[in-house]
Image (tube, grey):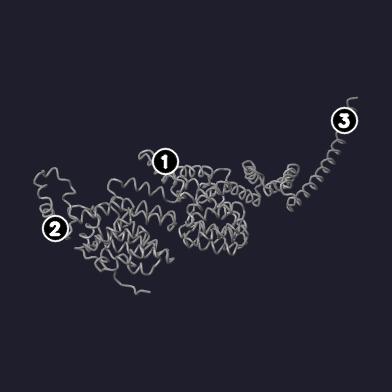
Amino acid sequence: MLSRKKEIFRTPPNQTAKQSTKIFETPGSSSNKSSFFNLDRSSNINNNNLTTSQNRSDESLSQADFLTPIEKLRLWRHDVIGQHQYKTAEFLGDKILDLTNDPNDAFWLAQVYFDQGNYSRCKDLILSSEEFSNSILCRYLAGYSLIKLEQWDEALELIGEENPFDKEDRLKNDDGGVKLEASMCYLRGLVFVAQNNFERAKECYKEALLVDVKCFEAFNELIRNNMMTPREEWEFVTSQLNYREIDGNNDLIKLLYATRLNKYVHVDRFKEAEQILREEYDLMDNCDLLLSQADYLYVQCNFDACLGVCEKILFKDQFNFDVLPNYLSCLYELGGRNKLFYKSHQLAELYSSNPMTWLAVGTYYLSINKIHEARKYFNKATMLNPNFGQAWIGFAHTFAAEGEHEQAISAYAYAAKLFPGAHLPNLFLGMQHLQMNNLNLAKEYLLASHHICEEDPLLLNELGVVYFHKNELDRAEFYLQRALQTSRYLNSNSKTWISIHANLGHVYRKSNEPYKALECFNQVLKVSNKNDANILSAVGLIHMKLGDYVPAIDRLHDALAISPLDPIANDLLKKALEANKENSLEFFSKFENLTSDLSDAQCIFSDSDD
């Protein structure tokens, strides 16, 4: 391992501005002069085109006539780079660099190598000369090349473990581009993520945005990887960033950033931002805005509507990878196996090296209950990208589906490490421990998830279940009622909505509030596409407690029609029939006594009448 340098190289202040200006200048501008040939503009024209220049006026001279030979070569180089003719750019750039030995030209030749994927060649070129490596932009490109080569320690050695620039010494960009200081912070974040130092990575990404809010790469890493809790996201992005630096577009960028944030909190502010972008900026059909809408619908468990938005995005851009996690999840929830198969086959044919492809394939096999095959492809996705959180969660789901709780817990725990600001991994950990009847551990993980996100109805529902099993019925009712409040936007056909009402019914049943319990259970039976034997058995039990044996028997018969071998329903039905029989005998006995009394009364009435 290379020894760490305590201080990263700093370009001297008097050279930084000069060097940055030179790098960012438009090729061919008047300040981009070359000393090659030791020719100036006037001598070039006088010696080579003396006769021509005497016969035409200054107004008729084209701009190209005022360029030196090197400047013309640079224009040619930039033109072929724009047309992706990299061999020509490499041919020209190599000659230009040997003629000028200018760090600016070294950067553009290294850029050609980088764009072709020749990262080692790019890095070696820049580090071959102290003058080249002293350029901040060249240093940035060399560091990025080392990251592409997965040489993490060397990359950190080159770009530094800390940001060397203070507020007085920060790099300035007069052209409105992203500041190099912010880009270097972004690179540090990439290195720390690769080294599984997620806390340091988060701080680097945040610093990049604080230095320059235009560094979207850092913003995307923070939000996509859930490095902050939902409330931390909103506080940081809406209150701490300086949008005034984006001259004329500050409101637009702030609104666009807001639509990317977590949808569990500040729903009203998200909707307001979305409305402004649609009405005032005319971004009605923009894919990013549609993606934010899909995220919101998915959070609300409105899978039908979310799928519709995802398909609208894919119609415009069929290989938009950002929308695929939502699209795949909705198809899985709604049973869209044919569409899952088609998309998986399409991705495997065109993007076989992309981890998202194997996430799609694994999701398809999970949907058809081929757990072993699903696990294999989820694992392949994690091998292609070890920090692919969705693939790790899918991998864990395959163990959970087969009841292999220990392996599922291990995979969910790694996903929790990857996504420190996401509540779902801890939620799944709590659910696994609940299935293993480890109530204290389940409670601990669910409360940890609740600390990150307080508004997820599924999480609140699971907390209610834990307290129900711990016989803390008041707390169980509290969390289930909160789950109902947060699920007010949910589709009533969703599994979460049905589960909340069913569990609340059981809480009321155990709390000896039968009529409230019946109301909850009846709502479930009303909206559920198919009756649940357990719910029908619970309804039958409540009717038995109320002494309504006939409806109890009807409900228990319905439960056994669905699950004929259900021991609880069978036992309850026997008791209900016996109780109904005894109740009928008692009723008939009372009826005979009443009939006898009425006959006597009629006789007495007749005698007196006589």
Task: Please tell me which residue is depicted at 20% across the width and 55% down the height of the picture.
Answer: 71
Q: Nearer the viewer, residue 235 or 599?
A: 235
At label 3, which amino acid type do we have?
Gln
Residue to which mark 2 is pinned:
39
Task: Find the distance from the CA under tag 2 to the CA under tag 3.
Answer: 139 Å
Q: Residue furthest left?
A: 54
Residue 1 screen position, x and y as percent: 38, 74
Residue 4 screen position, x and y as percent: 34, 73
Q: Nearer the viewer, residue 308 or 109?
A: 109
Q: Quadrant of residue 155?
A: bottom left
Depth check, mark 3 against mark 1: the one in front is 1
Task: Identify the mark nearer the N-term, 3 or 1.
Answer: 1
Residue 517 screen position, x and y as percent: 64, 46
At label 2, which amino acid type do we have?
Leu
Depth check, mark 1 against mark 2: the one in front is 2
For label 2, the crowd category at 10 Å Cα-Cα, with few meaning under 14, some 14 to 19 and many 20 or more, is few
Task: Find the distance from the CA under tag 3 to the CA under tag 1.
Answer: 86 Å
Task: Find the distance from the CA under tag 1 to the CA under tag 2.
Answer: 55 Å
Contact check, label 1 and label 2, Cβ < 8 Å: no
Residue to which mark 3 is pinned:
602
What element does badge 1 sit on?
loop
What element does badge 2 sit on?
loop
Residue 70 screen position, x and y as percent: 20, 56
What element does badge 3 sit on?
helix
